[in-house]
Image (cartoon, rainbow, N blue to C red):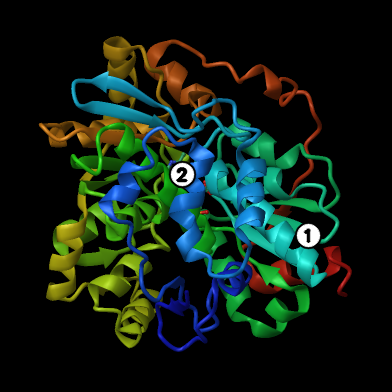
């Protein structure tokens, strides 16, 4: 199994190398050269399997010889052992033919744990074999950062630096990143928005002298392994609703396009997914792009679903690559337009392909609050604002085909928005008691590449 870059000129890599490399050296994102297929009988055989067993069967064909079967099974077992629900990703019913996939039972209460806990295990195993040391730099709008810190805290051969937009994450998210006391954890509050954090991270990957000096590794969804781990729950959810004998639709609260792209990989593998609906908040660049054919950044507007306050949606590049018949030069051209002008126009054929693959909708701030209140009233489920965006956007698509909306975070990560909508202040699980009492450790940093690189070099003892 080989991985190729969306910009067409970086070397092809195997799974292990793609995971440790993160961003391709031509600035693109790694994707499989060909997506492995799962026959209907193999999909049907997932019925009744544990989440861990399903994870093994769905992901194994993508791994080549990076791990033996026994090693991979052991890594999966360790990754999901700390989840607070036996099903790992339980489905609950909201309405006739509308289901919620609860992805917030991991250690940091967001869907990121599904991939990050596994990447943590896989990277540690790879580092133990190679004996090397890495520096992880992550960009976060709140959830990736806390999940990454949880997965890598305390490891002697990994330093973790997390860039988050100062003042634009929830207090719970901030404290999850700033209260761990391990010396390999560095929370950096950047003067800017998430797009600035992600842009500086990509700048670091594209600055080869720095990248090689610190052994830079990435755990954002630019890393293919992140996407792969998120493919699994599409299979477990769909099979429990009757796939492969029946179609299932999904609505996905979307920001960086990683989670919904994972759904498109599940569909490419053979899972009978009908509609994949992109649900955006008021930062609706993806909805506008799919509707108008023009991808144009407008500046981020802070919302009550802050983890989706994103304009430069990294994984959209992977979907574009497929829609452009895997023409890396064409993708590179559109990305250059985006960098130089803040916009690009999707060629008509590619736009039709994207529209065939993805429906979309937008949810305003008021609609988000109303969806939280309405869902509590009609089904007793308390939603986080991101999941509420999903539920609102899913509603016009409800019909004969079961719809699964992804619940991407626990409501207690966003208590202010939930309380404003319902009057109920959701409590953190008891295992997180003390989060508000522990001292915080955070460094304010400018939105400046040279300053960030200097800080990382100094903290990792390279200067
Ligand atoms: C709670 C939550 N919901 C949804 C999203 C959107 O996911 P993605 O970036 O994979 O589209 C994120 C982060 O991006 C998130 O943290
Ligand atoms: N919402 C994310 C943004 C980063 O997304 P990623 O999936 O690329 O890591 C976050 O919570 O940080």
Mark 1 = which residue? Answer: 158
Ligand 1 under 8 Å from disc 2 Cβ: no
Which of the marked residues, 2 or 1, is nearer the chain's N terminus? Answer: 2
Q: Secondary structure at mark 1?
A: strand
Q: Is residue 211 left or right of residue 294?
A: right
Left or right: where 334 falls relative to 31: left
* Foreground residue among 39 and 343: 39
- Whether residue 210 is visible to the viewer of this picture, yes or no, is yes
Specify the quadrant of the image occupied by residue 421: top left
Q: Position of residue 355 (x, y in %)?
A: 16, 59
Question: Dot 2, crowdedness within 10 Å: few (<14), some or many (≥20)?
Answer: many
Left or right of 443 on screen, residue 338: left
- Count the marks: how many? 2
Q: Which residue is mark 2?
A: 54
Q: In the image, what residue occupies the spot 48% across and 56% down?
A: 59
Compared with 398, 235 (above or below) is: below
- Point 21% across, 44% down: residue: 361
The residue mark sitting in front, 2 or 1, is: 2
Residue drawn 15% across the image and 37% down it: 397
Horizontal and vertical percent position of residue 282: 31, 43
For the question of whether residue 189 can be seen, the reply is no
Gap in Å between the C-alphas at discs 2 and 1? 29 Å
Quarter of the rendering containing residue 6: bottom left
Tag 2 secondary structure: helix
Residue drawn at 54 percent across, 49 percent down: 115
Q: Nearer the viewer, residue 166 or 437?
A: 437
Residue 106 location, x and y as percent? 58, 34
Looking at mark 1, is its residue's CB closer than 8 Å to ligand 2?
no
Q: Quadrant of the C terminus?
A: bottom right
Considering only vertical position in the picture, is 212 above or below 243?
below
């Amino acid at each position: 199994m080989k991985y190729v870059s969306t910009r067409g000129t970086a070397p092809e890599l195997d799974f292990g190398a793609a995971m440790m490399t993160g961003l391709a050296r031509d600035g693109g994102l790694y994707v499989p050269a060909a997506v492995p297929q799962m026959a209907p009988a193999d999909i049907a055989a997932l019925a009744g399997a544990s989440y861990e067993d399903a994870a093994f069967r769905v992901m194994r064909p993508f791994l080549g010889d990076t791990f033996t079967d026994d090693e991979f099974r052991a890594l999966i077992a360790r990754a999901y052992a700390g989840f607070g629900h036996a099903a790992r990703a339980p489905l609950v019913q909201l309405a006739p033919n509308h289901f919620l996939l609860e992805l917030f039972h991991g250690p940091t209460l967001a869907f990121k744990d599904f991939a990050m806990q596994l990447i943590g295990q896989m990277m540690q195993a790879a580092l133990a074999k190679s004996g090397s040391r890495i520096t992880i730099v992550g960009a976060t709008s709140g959830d990736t950062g806390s999940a990454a810190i949880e997965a890598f805290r305390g490891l002697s051969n990994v330093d973790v630096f997390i860039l988050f937009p100062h003042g634009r994450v929830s207090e719970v998210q901030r404290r999850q990143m700033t209260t761990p006391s391990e010396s390999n954890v560095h929370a950096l509050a950047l003067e800017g928005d998430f797009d600035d954090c992600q842009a500086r991270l990509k700048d670091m990957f594209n600055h080869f002298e720095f990248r090689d000096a610190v052994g830079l590794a990435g755990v954002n969804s630019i890393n293919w392994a992140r996407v792969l781990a998120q493919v699994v729950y599409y299979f477990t959810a769909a099979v429990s609703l009757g796939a492969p004998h029946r179609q299932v639709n999904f609505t996905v609260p979307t920001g960086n396009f990683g989670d919904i792209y994972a759904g498109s990989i599940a569909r490419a593998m053979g899972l009978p997914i009908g509609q994949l609906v992109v649900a955006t908040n008021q930062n609706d660049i993806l909805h506008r792009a799919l509707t108008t054919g023009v991808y144009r950044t407008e500046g981020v507007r802070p919302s009550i679903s802050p983890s989706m306050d994103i304009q430069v949606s990294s994984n959209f590049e992977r979907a574009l690559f497929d829609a452009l018949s895997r023409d890396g030069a064409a993708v590179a051209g559109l990305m250059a337009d985006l960098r130089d002008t803040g916009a690009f126009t999707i060629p008509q054929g590619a736009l039709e392909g994207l529209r065939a693959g993805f429906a979309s909708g937008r949810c305003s701030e008021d609609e988000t609050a109303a969806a939280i209140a309405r869902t509590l009233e009609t089904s007793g489920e308390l939603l986080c604002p991101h999941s509420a965006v999903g539920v609102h956007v899913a509603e016009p698509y409800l019909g004969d085909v079961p719809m699964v909306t992804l619940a991407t975070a626990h409501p207690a990560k966003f208590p202010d928005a939930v309380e404003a909508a319902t009057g109920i202040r959701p409590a953190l699980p008891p295992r997180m008691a003390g989060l508000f009492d522990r001292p915080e450790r955070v460094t304010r940093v400018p939105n400046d590449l040279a300053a960030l690189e200097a800080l990382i070099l100094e903290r990792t003892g390279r200067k």
